[in-house]
Image: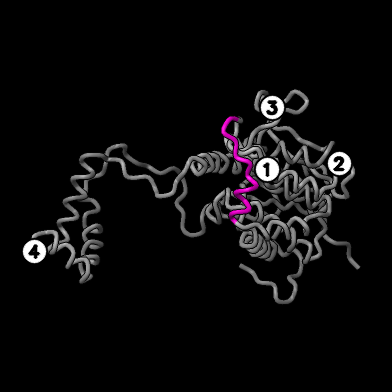
Amino acid sequence: MAAPTRVALALGSGGARGYAHIGVIQVLEERGLDVVSVAGSSMGALVGGVHAAGRLDAYAVWARSLRQRDVVRLLDVSLSAPGAIRADKVLARVRDLLGGVRIEELPIPFTAVATDLAARKEVWFQQGPVDAAIRASIAIPGVITPVVLNGRLLADGGITNPVPIAPTASARADVTIAVSLGGEPRGPNGAGPEQETAEARPMEEWADRFRAGASQLLERDAVRSLLNRFGGGAEPTPDEPVAAAVAAVAADPFGTLPPGVGKFDMMYQSLDAMQSVLVRYRLAGYPPDVLVTVPRDACRSLDFHRAAEMIDVGRALAAEALDGAGLGAAPAGEATA
């Protein structure tokens, strides 16, 4: 019988999208692929460390059980610390699962990547308590408080290395598989930078589209009745909302912010934008044999109550990537994306 294909696995950063890593690992195991080395940043370090300790199934069961109210209770919000969330309660659960195991005792070699903020470089944890290494790696700037360890001020590994392939380079593996959590939304996307002017565009450039939308709205009897009632009986026309929009743009060329955008959303979207560029740079230096890419719009970074959904996303994307690479036979009935 042929020996199983040996896999070096790099798991990327991306908040709650990191639950997709669980689905990827499940598919690797189901296809008989042998993970012989794991490296992870942020949520990738958490999932990778738990897997290397042989406790991934228990963690997945717990993650699937979380509802939104449970996540709120776990987030340890702090108004005074240099991060909105202390994450002590989450790490306490992870610590219970790991049982105090050390990295050098793990059956699978494991590296957690963090960032030394003062030295401005990445730090690889390949010794010491697994839970401490994970805690350093998940300290998202402004969101989860950083930690001080051995005189180093440590924060999220995704700041410097969002998909850490380099730590697995010495592994005796047949194939390297990387999982990035910052992919472009699925669908057509233009390449290269977008050209735009800082001057508000003339309304005439898109008035026809606006007018068409207004016409559809005015076709509704209830809307027409309401406008007639408060408009003195005058018959409304599509040009009226267009004229109002022109006046609004003239007064303030900036549009309104999307509804529901909060401080955390802005921080995460800013980090995602920076990391997407850094991921391309890193992957060019250490190209994996197989890349599983999770779209960044699969869920928001703090949607930790959506574990079941993201695990399924990881399973589907892993099956698609492995089929494309011809790795492992898909079990009967396995769904592909």
Above or below, 206 relative to 169: below
**Which tag is nearer the camera, tag 3 or tag 4?**
4
Q: Going by the image, does 270 lie left or right of 250?
A: right
In the rendered image, which residue does mark 2 sit on? 102
Position of residue 202 measured from the top left corner of the image (x, y, whole percent):
22, 45
CA distance separating discs 4 and 2: 78 Å
Name the foreground residue: 284 vs 135: 135
| Circle 3 Cα neighbour tier, 10 Å, few/some/many (<14 / 14–19 / ≥20) | some
Name the foreground residue: 137 vs 323: 137
- Check disc 2 and give the amino acid type: Arg
Q: Secondary structure at mark 3?
A: strand
Above or below, 330 relative to 90: below
Q: Secondary structure at mark 2?
A: loop
In the rendered image, which residue does mark 4 sit on? 233
Which residue corresponds to the image point at 51% horizontal and 58% vertical from the top-left? Answer: 186
| Circle 2 Cα neighbour tier, 10 Å, few/some/many (<14 / 14–19 / ≥20) | some
Magenta extent: 68-80
Q: Secondary structure at mark 1?
A: loop
- Check disc 4 and give the amino acid type: Gly
**Which tag is nearer the camera, tag 4 or tag 2?**
4
Q: Is residue 170 magenta?
A: no
- Check disc 1 and give the amino acid type: Ser
